[in-house]
Image (cartoon, rainbow, N blue to C red):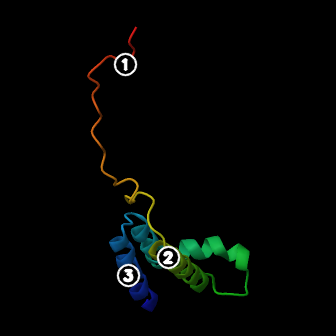
Amino acid sequence: MGFLIIEGILAAFALKRGWRIAPFALVALPLATYLFEEAFAVALGPWIGTYFDPANTARALGHGIALVGLAITCWTDPSEAPTAAKQAPQRPARRRSRALYEI
């Protein structure tokens, strides 16, 4: 549960950088593992066998994916954010006083 505080701070920073959906989706992943712990444990059970507790492994994977994803979103700029090239002012089109082709 302590990781949710770190994930919340990273999500707030990612939202400040301009990300829209990714921080919410990445914070929702660990919350989904808490709410549907048994479903994730059943899904991971055959893969990890009897070596690890499936419920704790699901929670750890949820937090790990969320932390790595939020670190990437905090480090990179969103693709839909306007860049300097896109914000360049457009010059008005010049109107020709004569015909384009003169015969």
The residue indicated by pointer 3 is 8
**x and y percentages locating residue 96 in the rendered image:** 29, 25
Left or right: 51 as drawn, with respect to 68: right
Q: Residues within 10 Å of mark 2 (few under 14, many from 20)?
A: many
Quadrant position of residue 57: bottom right
The answer to whether the residue labelled 2 contacts the one labelled 1, judged by CB atoms less than 8 Å apart, is no
The residue indicated by pointer 1 is 100
Q: Residues within 10 Å of mark 3 (few under 14, many from 20)?
A: some
Q: Is residue 8 above or below residue 28?
A: below
* Disc marking residue 33: 2
- Residue visible at 37% across and 58% down in the picture: 82
CA gap between label 2 and label 1 equals 67 Å
Marks 1 and 3: which is nearer the front? Answer: 1
Helix, strand or loop status at disc 1 = loop
Quadrant (top left/top right/bottom left/bottom right) for the C terminus: top left
Question: As shown in the figure, which amino acid type bears the numbered disc 3?
Answer: Gly
Quadrant position of residue 99: top left
**x and y percentages locating residue 14 in the rendered image:** 39, 74
